Amino acid sequence: EAVRRALEMVREGADIIDVGGESTRPGAEKISAAQELRRVLPVIEEIAPRINIPISIDTSKPEVARAAVKAGASIINDVMGTPLDREMAAVAAELGVSIVIMHIKGEPRTMQADPVYADLIPDVIRALRDSILTAESCGVDGKKIIIDPGIGFGKTAGHNIEILRRLREFKSLNRPILVGPSRKSFIGAALGIEDPRRRLMGTAAAAAAAAINGADIVRVHDVMEIAQLMAMLGKIYSS
């Protein structure tokens, strides 16, 4: 089913396929590296020779990242990127792949308990800058670093909306920006929609705001619809 959906996403206009085997939803429990590898490697091995776009491995474990890259992934999407694990950075440097460094406050199991910041945007930018410096000190090519402010990862609904509104401030880090708002609870809170599958229009609005405010990549479930949205934004803002 995962392979079928990946191939469908390519047909719908995806530019990257992100493969993950461990839930990062608030409250999610950790799983072992062995279990995660059993989930992701067969999918990557099956789709890598059948698609012509990059595959990213969504993981916080260096051993999973290494195996996934050897299986065909070319981007490490590190969901525990702040503070950046030096071992993960070393894997990216050694294998010469791109790495997405995401901001998270705490860990998925506890991150939404009571997220507090002295000053949200400067705090997140500072943490991401520190992780960029760590990655570069481990040998990662600075041109292969992508940043993600971590929508929904140790943030309140208000924090997430403020990040989208002020996303352009993250351009100060001089790195491509990835934003993942898709179907998340802040959309449900804003619109009063409990079922994540009914949050398409809220996701579309968040993705559009992200793109207009400087995002280079949006990570979404509903590829066809958001690809059309992005194509139309391109028509409007390139003229």
Image (spheres, rainbow, N blue to C red):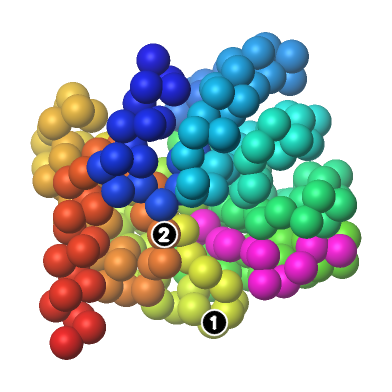
Q: Which quadrant of the rendered structure holds the N terminus?
A: top left
At label 2, the amino acid type is Ile
Q: Is residue 32 above or below residue 102?
A: above
Q: Residue 190: where, in percent of width, then height?
A: 17, 46
Q: Is residue 183 left or right of residue 141?
A: left
Q: Which residues are magenta?
A: 139-149
Q: Residue at x 72, y 71 (%)?
A: 142
Q: Give x and y (percent) for residue 34.
A: 74, 14
Give residue 99's quadrant in the image.
bottom right
In terms of secondary structure, where does tag 2 sit? strand
Marking on residue 217? 2
Residue 43 appearing in the image: yes
| Residue situated furthest bottom in the rendering | 239
Tell me the quadrant of the picture where the C terminus can be found.
bottom left
**Which residue position holds label 1?**
172
State the CA–CA distance, disc 2 to disc 1.
Answer: 17 Å
In the image, what residue occupies the spot 30% across and 67% down?
211
Q: Position of residue 86 (x, y in %)?
A: 84, 50
Q: Residues within 10 Å of mark 2 (few under 14, many from 20)?
A: some
**Which numbered disc, 2 or 1, marks the residue that appears first in the sequence?**
1
- Figure check: 134 above or below 9: below
